[in-house]
Image (tube, rainbow, N blue to C red):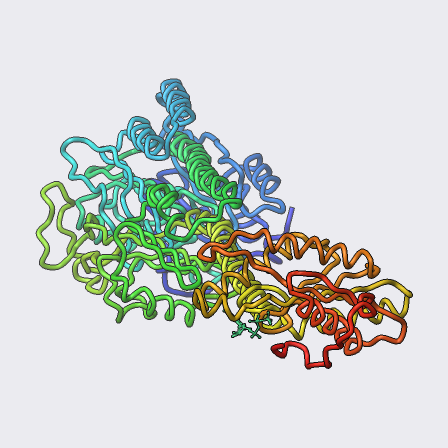
Amino acid sequence: MQSTSTSLPEPMSTDADAGLTIQSYGGLLVADAEARYVLQASRNLAGLLGRAPGEAVDRPLEQVIGARLTHRLRLELQGATRLTAPLTFSRWVGGRNRRLQLMAHRHGERVMLELEPLTGSGRRRLLGAVNQWLTRVAGASHPDALLEVLVAGVRDMTGYPRVVVYGFDGLGHAAAVAESRHAACPSLLGQRFAAHALPPHLQGGDGDFPVYYLPDAAAPAVALTPPRDPRQGARLAPQASALRAPSAALRRFLDGIGVTSLLAVSMPGDAGVWGMLVCHSDTAVALSPTRRDATHTLVQMAIQRLFLLKARVEAGFLQRVRDSRDLLSEQRGQPQSPRALLATHGGEWLELFRAAGAVLVHGHELATLGTVPPASLIDPLVERLAGAHHHAGPWHTHRLGEHPVTADLPLAPACGLLAIPLPTESGRDWLMLFRAAQADSHCWSGMPGSARPAAGPPACPVLRDALADWQRAVQDSSDAWERIERLAAMDLAEVLAIVASAHEIAGLNRELRQEKASLAEANRRLERLALRDPLTGAYNRYRIEQTLDAELSAAERYARDCALLLFDVDHFKRVNDGHGHEVGDRVLIALTEAIGSALRGCDYLGRWGGEEFVVVASSTPLSEACRLAERLRALIAGLEIDGYPESVTVSVGVAAWRPGDDRKSLVARADRAMYRAKRQGRNRVVSQADRANEGAQRPARPPGEAT
Ligand SMILES: Nc1nc2c(ncn2[C@@H]2O[C@H](COP(=O)(O)OP(=O)(O)OP(=O)(O)O)[C@@H](O)[C@H]2O)c(=O)[nH]1
């Protein structure tokens, strides 16, 4: 047992603690951190414990609530900030046994003990109802249906005439998303409250007290006895107890909407408070702690199920986007232009992302689908985005008209934009999804000048007076882009970048192939010009001389045969003169074709000049060369040429390489032989060996020169 003298606080004179007043249906004891002494008590303590506050303050806790209860309390509070479940006990008060509930939690250096009367009636029926609603919550298959079940269940279990679920958006604004109400209650469904304008019981939820219950807002608040210890004298914050009496602001708010009793249960989410379930009644409602606990349990179950269902809906959405992405990916082999891509897949994307239009910008190509801003504004928009957005994630807004990046671009009818940079090197490729302005269905409470909807809430002077800045009609706004949509769009953009780039690369390859083909053709033309005679296509003089030089050095080096055949068309002048140059040309061409077709692959035909041609016959001794020449002569003589009725004959001089020969000497011998063939009557072959048979010797002449 601890000594009173060492630990009892010194009395001090102070004003009543105005920070915390509590609701009269419950009672409050404030104890020291070790829960040994009562430091303060609510002034209605006698009604609950049968003991006046004066008989409790400064007393050991055991004396006030009993030794056994105190012992259990200390045990369960060890190392904890609150009891996990309320403790129940009985007390004789006013000649009858009363059942009470004790909840306790730490608040700074104090332990707060909250007392409430227990009404034990209807437990069995409650259990049945809870089970029934839990089963229905577990069976709900869609988030909306689940919330409907929840509000109906809570209304059934609590008897409140109106139960509303408010959802908070990312900015803390609340909207009534589900409601169950008695026919006489005006509906709050769809009603929105700006974050800073929310009534206190809706502001972000109270993490310490997930359930706030106000049986009767009109009931007088109960003060606490003043603290006596200066060290404990700091003012108790109003939030110190779940039994706190309504603040003046809450009281005014509830007055404004005609609510007397309130039960608010916070709905925690992954990141803070997701929403709040609120029960309203215009008359006082006595709700046993058991029913409140049951309500709390149902809400907790529902919120877990809600997230599960939301996750399923999101997974379904993601799966559909991935299916579309995979389909796209499978088409990598058949690259499509941005236009074709949008035409093939865009419709599905618009449906999936609830978008009115899409733009795909890739390289210099731009494709559009559905309702999008005017084409002339897409380039400036891309410019802006490229300047303002420097990471791989999506850029998004549901208010293009108000966003600093886009405010001065008249992008209507587009209102929301989800723009995903394609992961390409240019940094200027985008997939853009546009949403149209949403016809305003938001109803913000207390909007000045607006007529109250017939089924709307009663006028609320508190909100109307205090919240001028949020009393704007929601206009020029589209549905916001949800996180899951942004993630899915990024997924899509990744594959889109690959497919669109594949298309671009295929295009470049095509151009490259075309360029290569043109280049090869130009080279062929160039080669032809440089090495071939333009009329007949035979090697030109320059090329055939090169060939002859190469053959002669090979002959020299490897002691290999090589022969030269020099052809001259007989009386060619007559062909020209008699039939015209055109026919003369035709004769030269026909002759070239005939010789060319009769030669081996290792022989070369060249035009020596005018109507003179040479054949360089490699690895060919003189005798064979003569036979070849004779064969060619006969072939030419047998030619039938269109437009030239006569036979074309040639005189051929044949010379074979001898050691020490160079081009000049070999050509000179062939030329002399050819000259002899002319002299002997034309249309014949004469070789260098025949020289002995011929008396006259033709003087050497430059090759190609007319004889
Ligand atoms: N149509 C045409 N004629 C050519 C071409 N090159 C040279 N000639 C002509 O060929 C003729 C050669 O005549 P000549 O050198 O007198 O010899 P020839 O008439 O063949 O008489 P012989 O050689 O003595 O049998 C000239 O009239 C040239 O104008 C050509 O590319 N096309």
Q: At x 84% / y 71%, what residue is drawn?
A: 553
In the rendered image, the vertical position of residue 182 relative to residue 173, given as above or below: above
Residue 353 in sight here: no
Residue 204 x, y percent position in the rendering = 38, 52
Q: Nearer the viewer, residue 383 or 517?
A: 517
The quadrant of the image that shows the C terminus is bottom right
Residue 378 x, y percent position in the rendering = 32, 64
Q: Nearer the viewer, residue 4 or 222?
A: 222
Q: At x 82% / y 64%, what residue is drawn?
A: 562
Describe residue 455's horizontal placement relative to residue 208 as left or right: left
Residue 464 in sight here: yes
Residue at the far front in the pictured view:
695
In the rendered image, the vertical position of residue 536 relative to residue 259, given as above or below: below
Q: Quadrant of residue 603?
A: bottom right
Q: Nearer the viewer, residue 377 or 667?
A: 667
Q: Nearer the viewer, residue 691 or 371?
A: 691
In the rendered image, the vertical position of residue 178 relative to residue 609, given as above or below: above
Which corner quadrant of the figure contains ligand 1? bottom right
- Number of numbered discs: 0
Residue 607 x, y percent position in the rendering = 63, 69
Q: At x 24% / y 51%, what residue is drawn?
A: 251
Residue 683 x, y percent position in the rendering = 64, 61
In the rendered image, the vertical position of residue 680 relative to residue 701, given as above or below: above
